Each structure stands twice: as C-alpha cells, then as structure tokens.
Amino acid sequence: SNMAGPGYGYGMQGAAADPYAAFGAQGLGKPYGAIDAKGSADPYGAYGAVGAVAYDAGGFASQKPMMGGMGEDKGTFLRGRRRRMNVQPLFLSVLVPWVLFSVLYAVLSFSIHYEAPVLCFGIVAAGFLAVVLVGVLALSASGRWFANAEREPTWLKFMFLAGLLAFFAAYVLGSGNYGSNMERYYNMRNLNNYTGVSPAQMRGQQLMDAGVVQFAAGSKLDLSKSNGFKNNNVYCVAPITLGDTPLATYDFWVVGKNCCSGSQPDFHCANFNNPHANGGLRLMSDNDRPFYRLAVQEAEASYNIKAVHPLFFEWSVEPMTTVEGWRQTGVSEYLVWMLSFLVFQTFLVAVAALAFAKLGFN
C-alpha cells in the first residue's frame, strides 16, 4: 500500500520520493549531483566550492575551505596549512625604504642642498610626510582592508617602521656628508683660484674672492711672528712671507686651532714644517674668523707689523688635489651607504618574512 508521510520517504504513487524532502529549505541542501533549477547538476551540492584562495597580511596565500556555511574560518595563520609566498609586498618593503633613503641622502649631500636649501628641505619634509601617510594607512581601516587583515602583522606596518629608519638614517648621514665634504668642496669651487701669488707684492684686497691660492716659489711661514688667541680653543696664526725681507703688510696668514701655546711663537699646525707646502685653502668658517682676526691684531702689536687686510688659509701641499678629494670622498660615502642600506633592508625584510611565517604556525 502507498504510505505518505514525512517519516518514510515514499511518494504517493509508490515511486521513491526525495529522501531529503523532509528537511525542506532548512535541510542540509542538495545531495551530490543534484539537479538545480536550470537542469544542470551541481557537483558540490551542499558543500559549496572548495579551494578559495586569499592572501594574508604576511604576504602568503592559503586555502580556506568553506563547508556550506557550517565551517568557520579560523584566521589566516592555522597550523599545518599550506601557504604560498606573495613576493609583491616583500619587493615593495625592500624597494620603498631604500629609494627613500637614497633620494634623501642625495638631496642632503649634494648641490641642491648648497644651491637651493629651501627646495632641499621641502623634499625632506615631503619624504617625512610620505612615511607618516604609510603609518596612518597601516593603522586605519583602509589599511587593514588593503592588507586583508585586522589584528595580524602587516607589511604596511613594517614598511612604516622601515621608512622611519630610512628617513632618520638619511637625514643624519646626508647632513654629515654635506658638512664634512661637499659643502667645503662647493665653497671652494664657488670662489676663484690663484697661482703664483707673491706675499711680498700682492695685497689682501686684490684676492678677496680667493678660494685656492698657490703661492710663488720660495714662500714660507714666518714662525717667529706667529701668535695665538685663546677663547676656550686656542686660535693660532702665522704669516706667509717670501724671503727674509720684512713685508710692508702681512696680509696672508695660515691658521689652525689648538696647535700653539698662545703665549709664545710656537706655531705647529698642519704642514708647518713641510718644505713642499706652498698652497692655501681659504678659511670659510664665519664662527672662527673673528678669533683669528684678534690673534693677528695681537701679533701686530707684539711684532710691530701691519696687516691691512688679512686673509686666512689652511696650509697645504696640493690644495686643488685636496679640494677634489673632498668631492670624491663625498660621492664614495654616498655610494657605500646606499649599497649598504640596500643589503641591510633586504636582511630586515627576510627576518620579517621568517617572523610572519613563524607566527602563522604558532
């Protein structure tokens, strides 16, 4: 006999009824291979598609099986889950801080700093704002959406910290390179070079724009007329002469700091006894010049000499070679630090990638 009812699974005409009919819309869904409304079989049935892939915040891809809504996504970092590296955030995490460091170091070290300081520090400020923007994005909802994570470590946060490190490293190293090498080079290149200058015939007023001076053969320091003025440091001076004949005016002076006693003529600054030294590099320090001028005034009073318009120099063997050496040193330091930072940044990214992977399995 035909028996109808939800408990037996038979239809009214004796044919086999749908064994899942009793569950209705709230059952487990269609069986494997069930026919859908369009007449095609659904090979997955109630279990849905398996194998959806998403990238996590650490730059890895993982499979997330979805069991018909009954399963639950436990997060990106599940133990034992097969993961695939996404190289894009790793590449950007190396490239972006390195480019920031290289650009800011160059801007602070070279001619743009000397010729257009306002533009130079405008670029530096723009670099800092870019780093801050990355930090805001890393901590904001937009950044979490971009990184596909909410509470997990992200490459955006790493890039923000690396950007801060790159900014401050570039600022300190670039400013130091400029002050030690490139500023002096640009100062000298901005002034005139003179050769064959005779201290006995030339006057200071004639060489007011001098940067590098090569004195005439036979020029030397008259150490017997040296002097020092003490103001915390001892500012030492010695006149440049030619021969043994007293000069009408002693306008060319070699200077040095803390290389004399200040109480007697015992000048012993750089190259003071070098017989090959006969060139001078113009003193460019505005802070030291007044104290050297006072030392010269004391020498005028002590030795009954005149210095109408004194010019101050550092005594040198090959002054032009020294100036070119500043440029070469500045460029070399830039290249060395640029490549060193690239290696260092690559190392940091490798450590971060290993740390993110470790977090994914713990």
Image (cartoon, grey):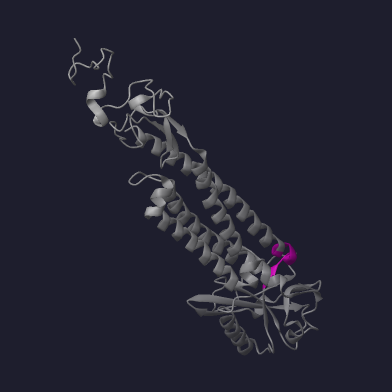
Decide if residue 317 is on the left or right side of residue 131.
right
For residue 89: magenta? Answer: no
Q: Quadrant of the C terminus?
A: top left
The quarter holding residue 296 reads bottom right
Decide if residue 167 is on the left or right side of residue 140.
right
**Looking at the image, which is closer to me, 148 or 283?**
148
* Residue 248, above or below 325: below
For residue 320: magenta? Answer: yes
**Looking at the image, which is closer to me, 2 or 212?**
2
Residue 116 at x, y percent in the picture: 63, 72
* Residue 30, above or below 56: above
Decide if residue 84 is on the left or right side of residue 287.
left
The magenta-colored residue range is 314-323
Q: Is residue 272 visible?
A: no
Residue 330 at x, y percent in the picture: 63, 59
Q: Is residue 61 visible?
A: yes
**Residue plotted at (27% across, 17% down):** 17
How many numbered discs, if any? 0
Q: Quadrant of the N terminus?
A: top left
**Looking at the image, which is closer to me, 212 or 116?**
116
**Residue plotted at (57% across, 85% down):** 294
Residue 356 at x, y percent in the picture: 39, 39
Find the residue positioned furthest to the top: 1
Residue 335 at x, y percent in the picture: 62, 52
**Residue plotted at (38% across, 20% down):** 33
The quarter holding residue 319 reads bottom right
**Residue plotted at (28% across, 14% down):** 16
